């Protein structure tokens, strides 16, 4: 499998993102869905990737820069037929490494609190994410779970402008 910068004009990517939005919104209370649409994914500070297995689109994911040292996992979605195959872990590790490479010290996310989102919460927990209070512009919401991962400075690659300060 390969993960590359995603083309938001590719019909396969557009279709998968529409499935992501529709399922997220259908499984979340009105006003509590925070998945980004195509326009949102084109905003400054967002890097978007697609995961391919040959010509088959496996999944998508994005990293949103909230601050120089803080990022957010956005729009991570694996095609239904590829779930429970390790593809979600592969995409999440890619996003984590991209955040480290960008000098981020913390990576956070928001996901749903409903049973539909339990597999996602389990995946994030397996990768070290822990519950946290709302961050950025989020507000407390019983339909949301907020999670964060501290990115160790020791794990980060050297910065071109010198070492990062703790």
Image (cartoon, grey):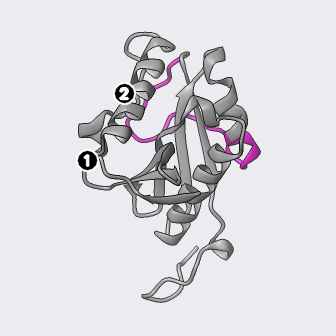
Quadrant, the C terminus: bottom right
User: Which residue in the structure is indicated by mark 2?
Assistant: 18
Disc 2 is placed on an element classified as helix
Location of residue 163 by image quarter:
bottom right
Q: Which of the pair 115/59 is nearer the observer?
A: 59
User: Which residue in the structure is indicated by mark 1?
Assistant: 42
Q: Which residues are magenta?
A: 124-141
| Residues at discs 2 and 1 in contact (Cβ within 8 Å) | no
Expressed as whole percent of the image width and height from the top left, the position of residue 85 reads: 71, 41
Between tags 2 and 1, which lies in front? 2
Which residue is located at x 46 percent, y 10 percent?
29
Does label 2 or label 1 sit earlier along the sequence?
A: 2
- In the image, residue 131 sits, relative to residue 32, either above or below, namely below
Q: Are there few (<14), some (14-19), or many (20+) residues within 10 Å of tag 2?
A: some
Quadrant, the N terminus: bottom right
- In the image, residue 52 sits, relative to residue 28, either above or below, namely below
């Amino acid at each position: 499998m390969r993960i590359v910068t995603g083309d938001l004009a590719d019909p396969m990517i557009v279709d998968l993102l529409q499935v992501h939005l529709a399922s997220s919104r259908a499984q979340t209370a009105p006003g509590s869905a925070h998945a980004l649409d195509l326009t949102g994914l084109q905003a400054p500070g967002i890097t978007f990737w697609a995961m391919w297995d040959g010509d088959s689109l496996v999944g998508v994911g994005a990293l949103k820069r909230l601050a120089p040292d803080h990022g957010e996992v956005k729009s991570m979605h694996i095609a239904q037929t590829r779930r429970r195959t390790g593809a979600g872990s592969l995409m999440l590790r890619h996003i984590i490494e991209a955040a480290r490479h960008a000098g981020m010290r913390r990576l956070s996310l928001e996901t749903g609190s409903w049973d539909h989102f339990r597999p996602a919460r389990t995946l994030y927990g397996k990768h070290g994410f822990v519950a946290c209070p709302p961050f950025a512009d989020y507000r407390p919401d019983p339909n949301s779970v907020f999670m964060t991962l501290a990115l160790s400075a020791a794990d980060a690659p050297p910065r071109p402008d010198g070492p990062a300060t703790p």
